[in-house]
Image (cartoon, rainbow, N blue to C red):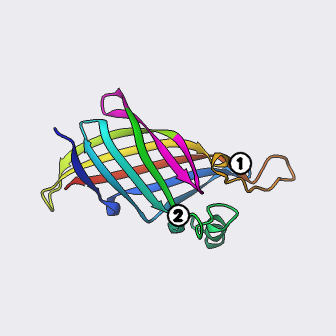
Amino acid sequence: MAKEKWVLDAAHSSVDFSVKHMMISKVKGTFHTFDATIEADPTDLTTANIDFVVDLASIDTRNQDRDGHLKSADFFDVEKYPKLTFSSTKIVKTRDNEYDVTGDLTIHGVTRSETFKVELVGLSKNPMTGAETAGFSVSGQINRSNYGLTWNAALETGGVLVGNEVNISLELEATKG
């Protein structure tokens, strides 16, 4: 299969994260607004071009006060830095249908190289539209302090309120088009 353009189906995709809270549990969240530009042969992602954009103001942790704090200058500062972006720079096949996708991740005005695990979950023809559709699972972890997201509070019992390691999980569906 040749490299072709794929259109992200946001209605069948998700961008989720989790981070330790108070050293004892994890807070989970999602971003509701995101998009991608994908040029790929889904059966061989090693030559793909992937650009991903997340609207940081669309954050949802199921707590309005926390979401407001995350949008503030203490964290994302969405007034100044409204988007998170990722642009692939290197893709290595690690196993059948599994890849390490490295790229430039920009958050809060800081760009760093990060690598994410990507699995081609499958290819199918959409019965409603007849379009060829691909499904991908993406996972990885970043250190938020590497992006200048360093706000925290010390706990009486030791440790800090917010962990540095952020787990990222995406489920993506894209249609050839």
Dot 1: element: loop
Report the disc number at residue 78: none
Front residue of 33 and 128? 33
Q: Residue at label 2? A: 56
| Image quarter of residue 41 | top left
Q: Position of residue 108 (x, y in %)?
A: 60, 57
- Identify the residue shown where x is 25% and y is 48%: 134
The magenta stretch spans residue 95 = yes
Report the disc number at residue 24: 1
Q: Quadrant of the N terminus?
A: top left
- Identify the residue shown where x is 55% and y is 43%: 112
Asked if 48 appears above or below 32 in the picture, the reply is above
| The residue stretch that appears in magenta | 92-113
Crowdedness near tag 1: few (<14), some (14–19) or many (≥20) residues, C-alpha within 10 Å: few
- Identify the residue shown where x is 38% and y is 51%: 51
Which badge, 1 or 2, is on the more N-terminal residue?
1
Q: In the current view of this chain or complex, which residue is farthest to the top?
A: 95
Q: Position of residue 90 (x, y in %)?
A: 40, 35
Front residue of 84 and 95? 84
| Image quarter of residue 53 | bottom left
The magenta stretch spans residue 67 = no
Q: Amino acid at mark 2?
A: Leu
The label nearer to you, 1 versus 2, is 2
